[in-house]
Amino acid sequence: MVSQLYDDATELQLNELICELDVNPIICTDPVEDSSYLKINLYTSEEGFQRIVEIKYNQHLAYLDQFIKLNATSIDGQTHLMFTLNRLLVKYQNSHQQFIDSPARLDWKIQSTSFSNRNPKNDFILQQQQNYTREAYRFFYKMSLTQLFFLSGIEEYITQQLKPYSSVIQEQIIKSDILPQPVIYHFKIRPEATKDSHYILQFIHKHLKDKEFITCTLPEFKQVFTSKTPTPILWLKDYIQLSYLIKNLSEKFLCAQKSPSNYRISTKLFYNKCGGAFFNPSKIRHDKDPNQTDKVIIDFIIKNSTDHFLREY
């Protein structure tokens, strides 16, 4: 039994401050102090913002310390702990990468020194507005650097907390009664798909991970489909998204199996995000499509993986 279920209250408070860029920051030149980013004005400054974030950051880490301590003494607790920390790590890593790739941040950095009004040389007001606008862009960029600083910090913290469990928990789970003999369940790839299976699974893994459906590495993901003794992995969505993926994969990529079916196999090779248990749907099949957002994501993945490589079949 899990010692303490995860409470996301402190996480959500911190995430509001560090996980998203303000894509519509407000520039004000009269006065420039009213320029704002995430509703924090320039008068407060990036140092003031750092102090605000630091409070929420420390509260969240204090909660995680307690959560880890309470769940570290049992297999069930460690399983729940590992899955929760993995989910958080993926969340913060994805946010970090979005910051790094953001064209807005690059533009703020450029505009902080290069923004110019038309013919400001002989107009004191225009020159002043130009300088204030540059100051606002500089403020936006420094605010994003503060966000990145805390993202890097919490990524490092979670990575360190996961180290004692990453190599041990899988063995403990398999040996425990939580997962009854998962190794007897394995998918079979259609013969005509075998040649391109590496590229297909690589594409599927990348996009499922990018969209926070899974957290595992590519080798861990591939062995679910290619090994006869696969080790189950964590699925971060609900069963309806998993069954829709399996339905589409079964049409071209996976061999159709009856006993057990691919749907039954999937419930033994993907953990439910809640507590690390198996999925246990009332109907082990694809009953209805998921929400439109996830359906579009999975359709895109199938179209550009199995459909792309196997269209001749």
Image (cartoon, rainbow, N blue to C red):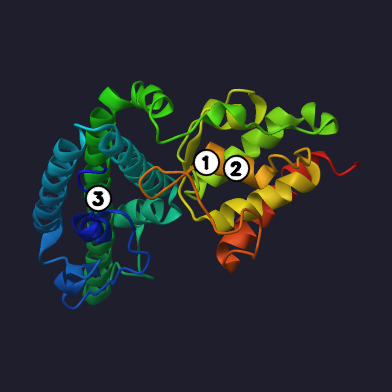
Residue 218 visible in the displayed image: no
Q: Nearer the viewer, residue 152 or 136?
A: 152
Image coordinates for residue 235, horizontal then vertical, percent: 49, 45
Residue furthest bottom as drawn? 30
Q: Position of residue 154 (x, y in %)?
A: 23, 41
- Residue marked by disc 3: 5
Q: CA distance from mark 3 to mark 1?
A: 20 Å
- Mark 1 to mark 2 CA distance (whole Å): 6 Å
Work out how far the residue at label 2 is from the one at label 3, CA to CA, in angstroms: 25 Å
Q: Which residue is mark 1?
A: 270
Task: Answer above or below: position of 166 versus 142.
Answer: above
Dot 3 falls on a residue whose secondary structure is: loop
Mark sitting earlier along the chain (2/3): 3
In the figure, is residue 238 to the left or right of 15?
right
Q: Which residue is mark 2?
A: 266
The N terminus, quarter of image: top left
Residue 168 in sight from this viewpoint: yes
Residue 309 lies in what quarter of the image?
top right
Give the residue type at disc 2: Ser
Tag 1–tag 2 contact (CB < 8 Å): yes
First of labels 3, 1 by sequence position: 3
Write down the quadrant of residue 239 in the picture: bottom right
Q: Residue at x 10, y 64 (%)?
A: 44
What's the amino acid at mark 1?
Phe
Q: Is residue 155 above or below residue 230?
A: below
- Between residues 122 and 116, which one lies in front from this camera angle? 116
Find numbered disc 1 in the image and state the secondary structure of the residue it sits on: strand
Looking at the image, which residue is at 37% across and 53% down?
A: 105
